[in-house]
Amino acid sequence: MTITVVVADDQELVRSGFALIVDSQPDMSVVAEAANGREAVEAVRAHAPAVALLDIRMPELDGIAAARIICAETPTKVIMLTTFDQDDYVYDALQAGASGFLLKDVRRDDLVHAVRVAAGGDALLAPAVTRRLIDDMVRRNARPGPPPRSLDPLTDRERETLTLLGRGLSNAEIAATLVVSEHTVKTHVSNVLSKLGLRDRVQAVIAAYESGLLRPGTSGVQ
């Protein structure tokens, strides 16, 4: 199955370079390129790609604003690309619904891997990194928080799974902790995402904090 991709960057050489790398893979195809955020949104609407690579700083509509529209309207997974690695950018990208965040000096193999991971519905940031970012933002109150997310739809085991996701554990580590198979963990993770309306594991980590299930500096259930 071919992974279709839209590449958006206002710098033509950068955009063409990423497109060339992606298009050179036997299981990937660049269906459109865009020079700004508005073009990126239009391209996603027109081609319904599996993944969109979006530069954060683009004219007319920046990458985060474009990601917010794309993630709200489509199932396309978004990877943010930037030369900046400040926590604010990462947090904003995740809040917009992005599945990951990569610096533009990313190695060729890592870029290709990121596209495959995003297309598969997984997170591109190490859970520990994601958790650190959320800890920092909550402590500093840098952003007004949304209303607490209700966990009522979850079973007790699904709440446990969400807690462990929020602590940054992999499926294998969750399986060992709960003494179940990895297949069972995948089912629990899928149920958590579905019941809470989350796109991926990154948003599950955010949900664990926003709901009060986890608090910054702790690793237990509240």
Image: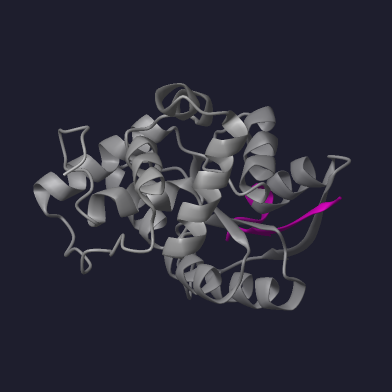
Q: How is the image coloured?
A: one colour
Residue 108 position (above or below residue 147): above
Residue drawn at x 40%, y 40% is 161
> Residue 221 location in percent, x, y?
21, 40
Residue 55 highlighted magenta (yes or no):
no
- Nearest the viewer among 205 and 19 is 205
2 part of magenta stretch? yes
Quadrant occupied by the C terminus: top left
Up-down: is 50 above or below 20? below
Q: Which residues are magenta?
A: 1-14
Total count of labels: 0
Residue at left offset 35%, top offset 33%: 129
48 and 158: which is toward the camera: 158
Q: What's the residue at 22%, 43% (across, down)?
A: 214
Quarter of the image for residue 38 reads bottom right
* 121 left or right of 201 in image: right
Residue placed furthest toward the left: 140
Q: Which residue is at 45% across, 59% downward?
A: 57
Q: Quadrant of residue 187?
A: top right
Up/down of 67 relative to 162, above or below: below
Residue 207: x, y in percent?
Answer: 32, 54
Residue 14 located left or right of residue 170: right
Write down the quadrant of residue 108 in the picture. top right
